[in-house]
Amino acid sequence: EIVLTQSPGILSLSPGERATLSCRASQTVSNNYLAWFQQRPGQAPRLLIYGASTRATGIPDRFSGSGSGTDFTLTISRLEPEDFAVYYCQQYGRAPDTFGPGTKVDIK
Amino acid sequence: EVQLVESGGGLVQPGGSLRLSCTASGFTLSSQWMSWVRQAPGKGLEWVANIDNDGSNKNYVDSVKGRFTISRDSAKNSLYLEMNNLRPEDTAVYYCAAEEGPWGQGTLVTVSS
Protein backbone atom coordinates (compact mmCIF):
# COMPACT_ATOMS: atom_id res chain seq x y z
CA GLU A 1 0.00 0.00 0.00
CA ILE A 2 1.22 3.50 -0.84
CA VAL A 3 1.44 5.70 2.27
CA LEU A 4 0.91 9.43 1.79
CA THR A 5 2.46 11.94 4.19
CA GLN A 6 1.20 15.53 4.22
CA SER A 7 3.05 18.51 5.62
CA PRO A 8 2.67 20.64 7.51
CA GLY A 9 -0.10 19.29 9.71
CA ILE A 10 -1.37 22.79 10.37
CA LEU A 11 -0.65 25.91 8.34
CA SER A 12 -1.53 29.25 9.92
CA LEU A 13 -1.78 32.07 7.41
CA SER A 14 -3.63 35.33 6.81
CA PRO A 15 -6.08 36.06 3.99
CA GLY A 16 -4.21 37.14 0.87
CA GLU A 17 -1.13 35.06 1.67
CA ARG A 18 0.18 32.16 -0.40
CA ALA A 19 -0.28 28.61 0.87
CA THR A 20 1.99 25.73 -0.11
CA LEU A 21 0.93 22.22 0.93
CA SER A 22 3.05 19.12 0.44
CA CYS A 23 2.12 15.49 -0.18
CA ARG A 24 4.82 12.84 -0.29
CA ALA A 25 4.24 9.23 -1.34
CA SER A 26 6.12 6.17 -0.08
CA GLN A 27 6.29 4.84 -3.66
CA THR A 28 5.95 6.33 -7.12
CA VAL A 29 2.35 7.28 -7.90
CA SER A 30 1.43 5.59 -11.17
CA ASN A 31 0.59 7.96 -14.01
CA ASN A 32 0.67 10.82 -11.48
CA TYR A 33 -2.82 9.78 -10.38
CA LEU A 34 -2.78 12.19 -7.44
CA ALA A 35 -5.78 14.26 -6.37
CA TRP A 36 -6.34 17.07 -3.89
CA PHE A 37 -9.55 17.68 -1.94
CA GLN A 38 -10.83 20.50 0.23
CA GLN A 39 -13.14 19.82 3.16
CA ARG A 40 -14.85 22.59 5.08
CA PRO A 41 -16.42 21.82 8.49
CA GLY A 42 -19.66 19.89 8.17
CA GLN A 43 -19.33 19.53 4.40
CA ALA A 44 -18.40 16.77 2.01
CA PRO A 45 -14.94 16.81 0.44
CA ARG A 46 -14.66 18.73 -2.81
CA LEU A 47 -12.32 17.67 -5.61
CA LEU A 48 -9.87 20.46 -6.46
CA ILE A 49 -7.14 18.83 -8.55
CA TYR A 50 -6.77 15.45 -10.30
CA GLY A 51 -3.96 13.96 -12.31
CA ALA A 52 -1.59 15.99 -10.12
CA SER A 53 -2.21 19.26 -11.98
CA THR A 54 -5.65 19.39 -13.65
CA ARG A 55 -8.19 21.62 -11.96
CA ALA A 56 -11.63 20.11 -11.52
CA THR A 57 -14.68 21.80 -13.00
CA GLY A 58 -15.49 25.12 -11.35
CA ILE A 59 -12.30 25.36 -9.28
CA PRO A 60 -10.78 28.87 -9.21
CA ASP A 61 -7.39 29.32 -10.81
CA ARG A 62 -5.81 30.42 -7.53
CA PHE A 63 -5.59 26.64 -6.85
CA SER A 64 -2.80 24.83 -8.67
CA GLY A 65 -1.21 21.42 -8.37
CA SER A 66 2.26 20.32 -9.33
CA GLY A 67 4.73 17.50 -8.88
CA SER A 68 5.34 13.99 -10.09
CA GLY A 69 6.65 10.64 -8.91
CA THR A 70 6.58 10.83 -5.13
CA ASP A 71 6.45 14.57 -4.39
CA PHE A 72 3.40 16.71 -5.00
CA THR A 73 2.35 20.24 -4.07
CA LEU A 74 -0.92 22.13 -3.83
CA THR A 75 -0.54 25.90 -4.02
CA ILE A 76 -3.21 28.46 -3.21
CA SER A 77 -1.89 31.71 -4.63
CA ARG A 78 -3.91 34.13 -2.50
CA LEU A 79 -6.01 32.80 0.36
CA GLU A 80 -9.66 33.81 0.40
CA PRO A 81 -11.74 33.52 3.61
CA GLU A 82 -13.52 30.42 2.24
CA ASP A 83 -10.19 28.63 1.67
CA PHE A 84 -9.56 28.02 5.36
CA ALA A 85 -10.29 24.31 5.56
CA VAL A 86 -8.67 20.87 5.65
CA TYR A 87 -6.93 19.62 2.51
CA TYR A 88 -6.34 15.96 1.67
CA CYS A 89 -4.27 14.34 -1.04
CA GLN A 90 -5.21 10.95 -2.51
CA GLN A 91 -3.39 8.54 -4.81
CA TYR A 92 -5.54 6.43 -7.11
CA GLY A 93 -2.86 4.93 -9.31
CA ARG A 94 -2.54 1.65 -7.43
CA ALA A 95 -5.03 -0.24 -5.33
CA PRO A 96 -5.74 0.22 -2.54
CA ASP A 97 -6.31 3.91 -3.11
CA THR A 98 -5.01 5.88 -0.13
CA PHE A 99 -5.45 9.31 1.43
CA GLY A 100 -3.02 11.47 3.32
CA PRO A 101 -3.86 12.54 6.90
CA GLY A 102 -4.69 16.09 5.84
CA THR A 103 -3.34 19.62 6.28
CA LYS A 104 -5.46 22.14 8.13
CA VAL A 105 -5.17 25.70 6.86
CA ASP A 106 -6.35 28.04 9.56
CA ILE A 107 -6.48 31.77 10.06
CA LYS A 108 -3.46 33.34 11.69
CA GLU B 1 -26.55 20.11 -12.46
CA VAL B 2 -24.29 17.21 -11.57
CA GLN B 3 -25.40 15.47 -8.42
CA LEU B 4 -24.64 12.23 -6.60
CA VAL B 5 -27.08 11.31 -3.84
CA GLU B 6 -26.39 8.56 -1.33
CA SER B 7 -29.07 6.74 0.66
CA GLY B 8 -29.48 3.69 2.83
CA GLY B 9 -27.53 4.70 5.92
CA GLY B 10 -28.85 4.34 9.44
CA LEU B 11 -28.43 2.67 12.81
CA VAL B 12 -27.66 -1.04 12.79
CA GLN B 13 -26.56 -3.51 15.44
CA PRO B 14 -23.14 -5.19 15.29
CA GLY B 15 -23.32 -8.14 12.93
CA GLY B 16 -26.11 -6.54 10.93
CA SER B 17 -26.33 -5.53 7.28
CA LEU B 18 -27.04 -2.43 5.24
CA ARG B 19 -27.14 -1.61 1.54
CA LEU B 20 -26.03 1.84 0.48
CA SER B 21 -27.11 3.33 -2.83
CA CYS B 22 -25.77 6.22 -4.85
CA THR B 23 -27.84 7.67 -7.68
CA ALA B 24 -26.44 10.12 -10.19
CA SER B 25 -28.07 12.91 -12.15
CA GLY B 26 -26.37 15.01 -14.79
CA PHE B 27 -23.50 12.53 -14.69
CA THR B 28 -22.98 9.04 -16.15
CA LEU B 29 -21.54 6.76 -13.48
CA SER B 30 -20.20 4.30 -16.05
CA SER B 31 -17.91 6.98 -17.50
CA GLN B 32 -15.45 6.63 -14.60
CA TRP B 33 -14.18 4.35 -11.92
CA MET B 34 -16.39 4.87 -8.88
CA SER B 35 -15.47 4.57 -5.21
CA TRP B 36 -16.95 4.48 -1.75
CA VAL B 37 -14.98 6.55 0.77
CA ARG B 38 -15.79 6.80 4.47
CA GLN B 39 -15.02 9.21 7.26
CA ALA B 40 -15.35 8.18 10.90
CA PRO B 41 -16.46 10.94 13.30
CA GLY B 42 -13.65 13.48 13.73
CA LYS B 43 -11.27 11.48 11.55
CA GLY B 44 -9.76 11.67 8.08
CA LEU B 45 -10.85 10.07 4.83
CA GLU B 46 -10.57 6.33 4.24
CA TRP B 47 -11.02 4.73 0.83
CA VAL B 48 -13.26 1.65 1.09
CA ALA B 49 -13.76 0.15 -2.37
CA ASN B 50 -13.85 0.94 -6.07
CA ILE B 51 -15.22 -0.51 -9.28
CA ASP B 52 -14.26 0.05 -12.90
CA ASN B 53 -16.43 1.36 -15.74
CA ASP B 54 -18.09 -1.94 -16.62
CA GLY B 55 -18.04 -3.55 -13.20
CA SER B 56 -15.50 -6.22 -14.03
CA ASN B 57 -12.76 -4.99 -11.66
CA LYS B 58 -13.30 -4.34 -7.97
CA ASN B 59 -10.92 -3.50 -5.15
CA TYR B 60 -11.40 -3.29 -1.38
CA VAL B 61 -9.51 -2.05 1.65
CA ASP B 62 -8.34 -5.04 3.71
CA SER B 63 -10.61 -4.24 6.67
CA VAL B 64 -13.80 -4.80 4.63
CA LYS B 65 -12.76 -7.67 2.35
CA GLY B 66 -15.24 -10.53 2.57
CA ARG B 67 -17.84 -8.32 4.27
CA PHE B 68 -18.56 -5.51 1.77
CA THR B 69 -19.48 -5.79 -1.92
CA ILE B 70 -19.45 -2.93 -4.40
CA SER B 71 -21.62 -3.07 -7.52
CA ARG B 72 -23.14 -0.82 -10.13
CA ASP B 73 -26.22 -0.77 -12.37
CA SER B 74 -25.64 1.26 -15.51
CA ALA B 75 -29.30 1.16 -16.50
CA LYS B 76 -30.23 2.84 -13.21
CA ASN B 77 -27.09 5.01 -13.22
CA SER B 78 -26.47 3.82 -9.69
CA LEU B 79 -23.71 2.52 -7.43
CA TYR B 80 -24.19 0.25 -4.44
CA LEU B 81 -22.34 -0.96 -1.37
CA GLU B 82 -23.64 -4.10 0.31
CA MET B 83 -22.30 -4.20 3.87
CA ASN B 84 -22.56 -7.37 5.97
CA ASN B 85 -21.31 -8.39 9.42
CA LEU B 86 -20.99 -4.73 10.38
CA ARG B 87 -18.69 -3.73 13.22
CA PRO B 88 -18.66 -0.64 15.46
CA GLU B 89 -15.49 0.52 13.68
CA ASP B 90 -17.49 0.74 10.42
CA THR B 91 -19.36 3.72 11.90
CA ALA B 92 -18.77 6.63 9.51
CA VAL B 93 -20.21 8.90 6.88
CA TYR B 94 -20.01 7.02 3.58
CA TYR B 95 -19.43 9.01 0.40
CA CYS B 96 -19.97 7.96 -3.17
CA ALA B 97 -17.19 9.41 -5.35
CA ALA B 98 -16.18 9.52 -8.98
CA GLU B 99 -12.47 8.96 -9.48
CA GLU B 100 -11.92 12.33 -11.18
CA GLY B 101 -15.28 13.93 -10.61
CA PRO B 102 -18.08 14.70 -8.21
CA TRP B 103 -18.75 13.37 -4.73
CA GLY B 104 -22.05 12.95 -2.97
CA GLN B 105 -22.97 14.55 0.34
CA GLY B 106 -22.67 11.30 2.27
CA THR B 107 -24.87 8.98 4.31
CA LEU B 108 -24.25 8.17 7.97
CA VAL B 109 -23.86 4.58 9.07
CA THR B 110 -23.88 3.94 12.81
CA VAL B 111 -23.09 0.47 14.12
CA SER B 112 -24.06 0.20 17.77
CA SER B 113 -26.08 -1.95 20.14
Image: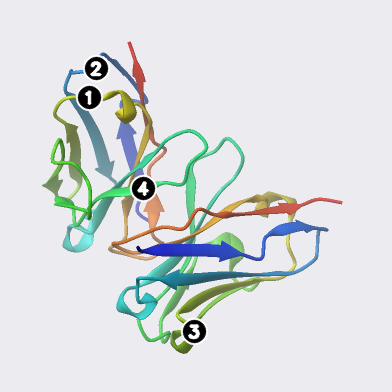
Q: Tell which subunit mark 4 falls on.
A: A
Judged from the image, the secondary structure of the residue bearing numbered disc 3 is: helix
Q: Tell which subunit mark 2 falls on.
A: A
Say what amino acid the circle numbered 2 marks: Pro
Residue A48: image x %, image y %? 26, 47
Q: Tell which subunit mark 3 falls on.
A: B
- Name the residue carrying label 1: A79
- Name the residue carrying label 2: A15
Residue placed most toward the observer, B66 or B98? B98
Q: Quadrant of the N terminus of chain A?
A: bottom left
- Near mark 4 (Cα within 10 A), the count class, few <14, some 14-19 or many ≥20, is many
Left of B91 or right of it: where is A73?
left
Q: Marks 3 and 4: same chain?
A: no
Task: For the residues labelled 3 and 4, say whether their Cβ atoms are less than 8 Å apart.
Answer: no
Task: For the residues labelled 1 and 4, say whether their Cβ atoms are less than 8 Å apart.
Answer: no
Q: Residue at x 34, y 15 (%)?
A: A107
Q: Which quadrant holds residue B56? A: bottom left
Alpha carbons under labels 3 and 1: distance apart: 41 Å
Alpha carbons under labels 1 and 4: distance apart: 17 Å
Judged from the image, the secondary structure of the residue bearing numbered disc 2 is: loop
Q: Which mark is residue A46?
A: 4
- Name the residue carrying label 3: B76
Residue B81: image x %, image y %? 58, 71
Say what amino acid the circle numbered 3 marks: Lys
Say what amino acid the circle numbered 4 marks: Arg
Q: Residue at x 38, y 30 (%)?
A: A85
